Amino acid sequence: MAYDEDLADRIRAAIQDQDGVTEMRMFGGLAFLINRNLAVSASGQGGILLRVDPAETDSLVREAGVTRFQMRGREMDGWVRVDPSAPASDDELSRWVQVGVRYAASLPSKEHGQLLRACLGKDAVLGRVRTRRFGQKSGYSCGHE
């Protein structure tokens, strides 16, 4: 199933004032990214896919029409699917878009990780501890598998 282009247009309108927005086809839909972090997507399975704070997942799925996103049968914290009928009005859709935008904007820009990989080599594995090569705390660790 292709994503709903009208829904994508409504998401685009709701996110237009946000800095760092890019669009990319992924997961069978059209994703809207903030600094290359997925925020919200017009899902190819209908409705919207949101990246959310993992700590908020349980409270969000208590709302009508909201379920955890499943990948290969496994439920994922930090990702929710909102049924097509849930964001009926533009205000409701805007609220959901802002949930995704708020979390994606809180994440480090993907460019930082890409630059670090370029410095350390394409086989570098980035984690969240310390950068060994530079010997200073940067929010990333580097190791090789």
Image (cartoon, rainbow, N blue to C red):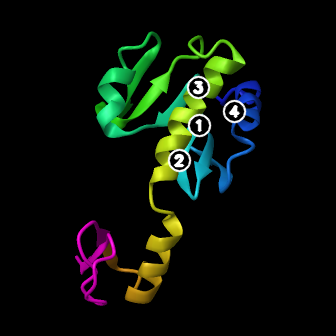
Within 10 Å of disc 1 (Cα), the crowding (few <14, some 14-19, many 20+) is: many
Q: Which residue is mark 3?
A: 95
> Residue 120 location in percent, x, y?
38, 87
Q: Are marks 2 and 1 in contact (CB under 8 Å)?
A: yes
The reply to whether residue 78 is visible in this rendering is yes
Label 1 – label 3 distance at C-alpha: 14 Å
User: Is tag 2's residue or tag 3's residue first in the polypeptide sequence?
Assistant: 2
Q: Is residue 4 left or right of residue 130?
A: right
> Residue 84 location in percent, x, y?
59, 16
Q: Name the element at disc 3.
A: helix
Q: Name the element at disc 2.
A: strand
Label 2 – label 1 distance at C-alpha: 8 Å
The reply to whether residue 43 is visible in this rendering is no
Q: Is residue 19 left or right of residue 107?
A: right
Q: Residue 90 falls in which quadrant of the image? A: top right
Range covered by the magenta-colored residues: 126-145
User: Is tag 2's residue or tag 4's residue first in the polypeptide sequence?
Assistant: 4
In what quadrant of the picture does the N terminus appear?
A: top right
Label 4 – label 3 distance at C-alpha: 11 Å
Q: Residue at x 61, y 16 (%)?
A: 87
Dominant secondary structure of the residues highlighted in magenta in the image: loop
Report the amino acid beneath label 4: Ile
Q: Residue at x 59, y 50 (%)?
A: 33
User: Is tag 1's residue or tag 4's residue first in the polypeptide sequence?
Assistant: 4
Report the amino acid beneath label 1: Ser
Q: Which residue is mark 4?
A: 11
Label 2 – label 4 distance at C-alpha: 13 Å
